[in-house]
Image (spheres, rainbow, N blue to C red):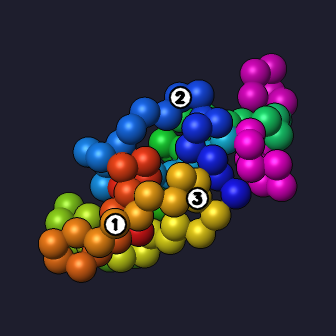
Amino acid sequence: MVDAAQISYRYELIHAQATAPASIILRDARWVTTDLNHTCTESHSGTSASAPLAAGICALTLSANPRLTWRDLQYIVIYSARPDGLYPNDWRVNGVGRRVSHAFGYE
């Protein structure tokens, strides 16, 4: 479970379209990446992990279909987001029938 209150770099995100939490609080997750002195680390977390994770997913999507526009990618992000295990559970249905959270953006 991801508890938004435990994420130190998090703010209320009503302006966010979606979030990509990547924090140490995900005890079973291992974020392995390169580190200093030609080594690897298994403790990669926070915005340093979540931003490249989201950017990489978007880049792979665009490389699979370069004809996608920013608006297409926006829809893909919104319609593929899943709120499983996220807390607080403050999801509300907006005017177009999509679930949205002040803490995490769209479902």
> Disc 1 designates what residue?
92
Where does residue 78 sit, x and y in percent of width and height? Answer: 33, 69
Callout 3: SS:
strand
Where does residue 77 sit, x and y in percent of width and height? Answer: 36, 67
Q: Amino acid at mark 1?
A: Arg
> Disc 2 designates what residue?
9
The answer to which of 53 and 26 lies nearer the viewer is 26
> Disc 3 designates what residue?
86
**Residue 23 visible:** yes
Cα–Cα gap, marks 3 and 2: 16 Å
Q: Is residue 101 above or below residue 6?
A: below
Q: Amino acid at mark 3?
A: Leu
Characterize the local packing of mark 1: few (<14), some (14-19) or many (20 or more) Cα atoms within 10 angstroms. Answer: some
Callouts 2 and 1 close, C-beta under 8 Å: no
Where does residue 38 sit, x and y in percent of width and height? Answer: 80, 27
Where does residue 26 sit, x and y in percent of width and height? Answer: 74, 49
Q: Amino acid at mark 2?
A: Tyr
Q: Nearer the viewer, mark 2 or mark 1?
A: 1
